[in-house]
Every structure is written in structure tokens, then in C-alpha cells.
Image (cartoon, helix red, strand yellow):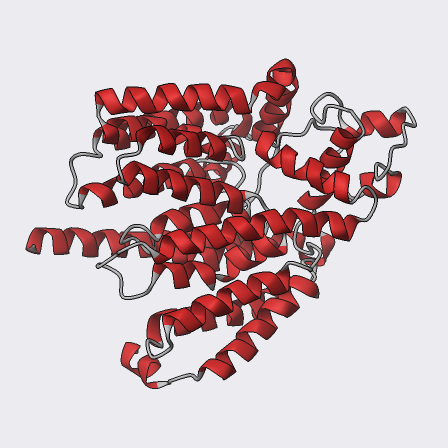
Amino acid sequence: MGTFFHAMSVRLPFFTLFFGGMAFWLAYFADRNDFLFFIAAYGVFFGLYIWVCFFQHQLQTRHLLVFGVALRVLLLFSFPNLSDDCWRFLWDGRLAVAGFHPFLHTPSYFIENNIVLPGITPEVYHQLNSPHYFTVYPTICQGVFAISGWLSPENNWLGVVVMKLFLLFCELGTIRLLMLERTPHRSVSPAVLYALNPLVLLEIMGNAHFEGAMIFFLMCGIVAMRRGKTAASAVYWALATATKMLPVLFLPIVWRWLGWRKGLVFCGVFAAATILLLLPLLAVLPNIAESLDLYFREFQFNASFYYLIRAVGYSVIGWDIGERSGPLLGLITLGGTLLIALATKRSFESRETRLVSALLFALFLYLSLSAVVQPWYVCVPFALSLLTRWRFPVVWTGLVALSYSHFDMGGREEHFALIATEYTVLWCFIGWEVWVFFRQSVTD
């Protein structure tokens, strides 16, 4: 089969025209409520991505990278059509410009008290997906939101474009770092895999999700750590944490990989930088904790093991045990991360690869036990995997599009058969990849 695909050569003009056309249509015109059209288009989009990246080696890397950058510029001007998170971004930014702390009140407070501010209108309010929850976006995000609100107090499209400009620079930085990555175990450039990935293109540059910024800061931190720049890597890690709180999960692994002394320096610098970056949030920590608690207890979307546990609860005792199992799953995630950290120095992989592989599997464990796995979350393990030999996150960036069935016909209901298909195929691929890895390791 591989020989067949290799034999079907594709010319760069055809690829750029068709691939670019698919990206343009999905970012500008796709309707997430029309799932059949969306998944058909995304399937073709992702299939062409796999075909070109893995079977068309005659195409020059530099041409594909330039095209990947051009696609990001093309998507810069689209308004998010697959996610409504951007409305909260705009709301938070305009509140900050108006002198209100974004974490102090829920959006419903302003509507119920008839507080009208530039850009804070009932029209924007009705687009919010969680108007009764406090915001949860940390300070780096809030800073970009505020700049957007300052430059565009009432123009929603322009406000999103301003945010996307920041994400564009982050994306260019990530691609540049991946261009410098040497991965002899890969036949495909990691930079090309990232630059052309459909999920990354649509969720970061199309839907303006700030996982793109976190990925850039994490990549900077990993590169700095590999070069022995412990303090610099800790600062980058703090910037990633001030974008999305997720990198805190990785601290045991980083400490173990660096060793006791360097790990202590890293954690000390990280703690100081993080406290400084998150200082504006200290006074509103109860509000943040309340929203996070409600998020993890009440929201469920595209989960894997969480859904299995919930199904067992319904069948055995007749009610949803999800809320009570959440803390236990959190403890399992923490324990699993500590075990991964302990095993970091005992692996068949090289020292540099072991670090990122450990980060990847800790994150995968976290997502596997989470009640909510939004499609854009998968961009992070995918980016980390590009520094390793593991390819299952590449497959996941294709499969996760099945979760958009939740929005089919505006029903907002899970299609469990499709979710089961997503994770069954993913776990089968992981099993095959682990088997190949250990067989090669024993042979070598």
C-alpha cells in the first residue's frame, strides 16, 4: 500500500491549490452544525496532509514550509466558525480596557445590572458559551485580550484579528524551532508536519485558541533546557503556565530529568516567575477556583475513560458517578505522572528524547482521564510528539474531528459510537506503535 501511495506523485501547484482551498473553506465557510459536510471536508483535508507528508518526499521541505506560513496568513482574517470561545476573549479584553478586573464578575452580572460598556453588549453576551462562570484564562491571554480590546473596542472581527496576529508570531516561532530539530528517527520534517497539520491550522489560526502560544513557550523551554540554560527554560515554562495552567503538571518530570540541583534551580526560578506573572490573579483566586471546579464537575465532552466509568456507574448503581470519580481520576493522573517521572531515566531512548516522551505520555494520561477533551487540546501532545519518535498524536489530530458530531444539527449531544470509534482506533494505533518500539529496542 505504501508503494502505491509513493507512486502516486503530486505536483506542488496542485497540492497548494487543493489543500489551500480546503483550508479556506473550512475556516471561512464551514458550519459545525452541518457535521456531514464538515467531516467529509476535514477527512479529505487530513487525508491529503498524510499523503503529502508521508508519501510525497519529492516535494521540497522549504516550499512546504513557506506554504504552511502562507496558510496561516490566509486564515488570519477568518472569524472563528468552529468555536465560540473568541467571544469570551473579546469580552474579557474589553472589560480590562474599561477598568474592570475580568475575573471579578461573571458576564451575567453586567447584563443583570444594565452596565453597558464599549463592546460589552447584549449581542456579544448572547454569543458566550458560559455567561454564568468566571473567566479562567491566565494573564498572558488576558494581556493579549486587553490589547485587542484597546485597539478594537467594538469591532469584533478586528479584535479577533489582533489576537490572531499574536498567535501568528507564536506559530512562526514554533515552526522555526522545529526546523532546527534533528530527528534521525523520522523521515519527515517535524516542521512540515506541524506547519501543514489541519487541526493546528483550524484550531489555532482559524479559531484563535491560545494553545498555539503555550506550545511556543513550551518549545522554547525544552530547547533551552536541552542546551543547559536552566533559568531561561524555567522562565519560558512560567510563560507557558501563564498562558494555560497545564505545564504545572510536568514539573516532577522536569525535576527528575534535570537532577536534584538543577531541578531545584528550575523550580525556584519557575516559581518566582510564575508568581510575578500571575500576581494580578492572586486577589481573585476564589473566583478562578470556583469556575475550575464547576468546569471539571459539570462539563463533559469527548472523554474516553471518564465515559467508561460513567457508563459503569449507570449500569451498576443507576446514576452518574462522574462528579465523585473526578477527584480520584485527578489523583491517578498525579500518581501516574510521578511514576513517569521516576521512569524518565530508565528508557531505551536517548536522554533528550526521553524528556519529551515523558511529557507526552504524562499529558496523554491527563487527557485520557479528563472529562473534557476539546479538539484543540490535542494540538499540544501533537506538537510534543514531533520531538520524539511517537506518531499516535498525528493520528489523533485526524480522529478528534469526530467529536464535532456533538454540534450536528445544533443538537449538542454526544454521538457515542463516533467517540468510541475515535478512541478505539487511537488505542489500537498506540498498541501497534508500542509493540514496534519494544521489538526494535530489543533487537538493537
**Number of marks in the rendered image:** 0
Query: Quick check: 181 above or below 237?
Result: below
The image quarter in which residue 127 lies: top right
Please identify the quadrant where the C terminus is shown.
bottom left
Q: In this rendering, would 285 be left or right of 409?
A: left
Q: Residue 120 at what x, y percent from top left?
A: 84, 36
The image quarter in which residue 34 lies: bottom right
Query: Quick check: 403 above or below 244?
Result: below
Residue at point 69%, 52% (across, down): 161
Residue 426 visible somewhere in the drawing: no
Q: Residue 340 at what x, y percent from top left?
A: 27, 33
Q: What is the residue that sits farthest to the left in this orientation?
A: 443
Q: Nearer the viewer, residue 188 or 381?
A: 188
Q: Residue 106 at what x, y percent from top left?
A: 75, 26
The image quarter in which residue 269 lies: top left
Q: In this rendering, would 297 be left or right of 61?
A: right
Q: In this rendering, would 119 be left or right of 384?
A: right
Residue at point 37%, 70% (across, down): 61
Residue 76 visible somewhere in the drawing: yes
Residue at point 48%, 68% (across, down): 66
Q: What is the residue that sits farthest to the right in this orientation?
A: 114
Q: Nearer the viewer, residue 309 or 404?
A: 404
Q: Residue 102 at what x, y percent from top left?
A: 72, 27
Query: Quick check: 277 above or below 379?
Result: above
Please identify the quadrant where the N terminus is shown.
bottom left
Q: Nearer the viewer, residue 68 or 314?
A: 68
